[in-house]
Image (cartoon, helix red, strand yellow):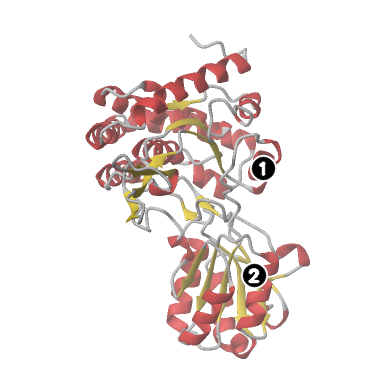
Amino acid sequence: MKDLDNIPALMADIGRRAKEASKDLAFASAERKHAALIAAADAVWRNRADIITANAKDLDFGRDKGLSPAMMDRLMLDEARIQGMVDGLRTVAEQADPVGEILAEWDMPSGLNIQRVRTPLGVIGVIYESRPNVTADAGALCLKSGNAVILRGGSESFHSSGAIHACLVEGLKTAGLPEGAIQLVPTRDRAAVQELLTMTDTVDVIVPRGGKGLVGLVQREARVPVFAHLEGIVHIYIDKAADLQKTMDVVLNAKTRRTGICGAAECLLVHQDIVDTIGHDVVAALVAAGVDVHAQGALALDGTTPASDADWGQEFLDMIIAAKPVADVDDAINHIRAYGSNHTDCILTEDNSAAARFFERLDSAILMHNASTQFADGGEFGMGAEIGIATGKMHARGPVGAAQLTSFKYLVRGNGTVRG
């Protein structure tokens, strides 16, 4: 039985086991990893009633903690969402194994043959908040890419994550892979996070997935390299050449489908020439759908709330959106540069030159044209699942799937070749 009171010893043991497992995983066959993921998917579905029971405990905890409706939605699991987890595990299982993939190959005049090939990162620490499905997504992607993973879920999802993790371990056992390959920190104690951030001997990279507070904490205190997954301050710019029906469909979906995910729209920018037409129609439709629109200028219709400076650059994760008129596409670009988080931003227009300018002059990890920002998701990008949306510029950007959880090494072959 692990000593949950001695956090440094607990985390050191988890790190040691992960490091040992990573050595085997680095060359585990594609077939064994596939078998582990399929067995895990079967176990999740077979144990769905137990997972929902565990989730009920977490929902009670969340209600007692006073979580917002959007955060409760992130936390909630039902049979449909469990089916989504199962589908994600199976999709990752069926993808090509990235480990060993030859990224480039060339011959040198010296006689050397050089290959650059994908290789696992080693041990990945994933720190996440309330969404328990991250347990399955992160576990699957790290295993597929040959990495051991240490999962530290949020206190709200403690029981759900534990039930899902048990299914992943069952998959590892079925395939004869080390149980240390996917470990879940078995305590809510925040001291475990502090330990994980400084385990430079056993952890190769930390992936924080959550709000600004969590990511900021990790970036400040980590001694291990970090893939930053910042908040989604998602903008939609409605250009003067936007199509009304497309605009209505995309904006309503982007804001209201699921308000608590990082791809939910948080700010609406409307070209001044269409404020009185498409702009008013969209704002009225949002208000009718129950959205609290914090509007500025001519977008401030009956039923809206006056916008304040604090609304720009805000991740609401709720049925709230900020809205303001802008002079043109360049004004929209400048606003997004000032207040965005380099996550996901969208332009709605039938003018391809305006879309090209938007794509060219913004550097968000994901840029969209005439499509809902709710597609900012690894599963929707064909990755099966994601470990998060990376907003930094080093190593991985955008949805981080299995291939993004690898580095590379060079294989150099000669024939008694010497350097003159």
Which residue is located at x 46 percent, y 66 percent? 253
Label 1: few (<14), some (14–19) or many (≥20) C-alpha neighbours in 10 Å:
some
Position above or below: 374 against 17: below
Circle 1: residue type? Gln
Residue at the (71%, 76%) spot, across then down? 296
Q: Which residue is mark 2?
A: 336
Residue 206 point in image, percent of width and height = 56, 38
172 or 26: nearer the eye?
26
Q: Residue 161, position in %: x, y?
A: 46, 31
Q: Position of residue 38 (x, y in %)?
A: 25, 36
User: Where is residue 321, by image quadrant?
Assistant: bottom right
Residue 9: numbered disc: none
Residue 335 in the figure: left or right of residue 155? right
Counting residues from the start of the chain, the first of labels 1 and 2 encountered is: 1
Query: Label 2 amino acid?
Result: Ile
Please tell me in which quadrant of the rendered image residue 194 appears: top right
Helix, strand or loop under label 2: helix
Residue plotted at (29% across, 22% down):
173
In the picture, residue 135 is in which quadrant?
Answer: top left
Q: CA distance from mark 1 to mark 2?
A: 23 Å
Q: Which residue sits furthest front? A: 420
Residue at image coords 35%, 41%? 82
Question: Please, what secondary structure does the residue beneath circle 1 have?
Answer: helix
As displayed, is residue 356 above or below residue 142? below
Residue 219 is tagged as 1
